[in-house]
Image (cartoon, rainbow, N blue to C red):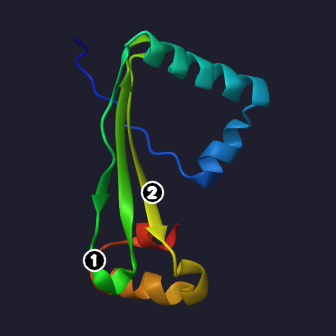
Amino acid sequence: MPDELHLDYLNGPDVAALALTDDEILAAVEAGLGAQGRGETVIEPRVHLIPGPAFHGHFNVLRGYVAPLDFADVKVIGDYVVNHALGSALLAKARLLGIGQRLRYA
């Protein structure tokens, strides 16, 4: 077992900077699906994190592991249907409650 743990956070600009080609993306998807077909993955059920009714939405928390790639991932997706209408008002409200900027991204 390695003595180090590395955590990476990728935002939109980070992903864009990678400039992955369609072929690279397809190869990664095929590798993941192949591993899943061989039973070499752990994909847990999606979990919803609901901060409260005032936010009109929730976070989807997705967790998984792909053994051949030795890669685990946690993906958090904000699903807030009124973000486009509220603009920065929802972000300001989230900051007041200490939830942070993640609420702004749907």
Measuring from the top left, give residue 28's x and y in whole percent: 61, 23
Residue at left offset 53%, top offset 86%: 88
Question: Which of the pair 50/73 is nearer the observer?
Answer: 50
Question: Which of the pair 103/58 is nearer the observer?
Answer: 58
Q: Residue furthest front?
A: 37
Judge whether 25 appears above or below 59 on screen: above
Measuring from the top left, give residue 24's x and y in whole percent: 71, 24
Which mark, residue 84? none
- The alpha-carbon separation of the residues under discs 1 and 2 comes to 18 Å
Q: Nearer the viewer, mark 1 or mark 2?
A: 2
Crowding at mark 1 (Cα within 10 Å: few <14, some 14-19, many 20+): few
Residue at left offset 61%, top offset 53%: 12
Q: Amino acid at mark 2?
A: Ile
Image quarter of the N terminus: top left
Which mark, residue 77? 2
Which corner quadrant of the image does residue 78 belong to?
Answer: bottom left
Sequence-first disc among 1 and 2: 2
Measuring from the top left, give residue 21's x and y in whole percent: 77, 30
Crowding at mark 2 (Cα within 10 Å: few <14, some 14-19, many 20+): some
Report the residue marked by disc 1: 98
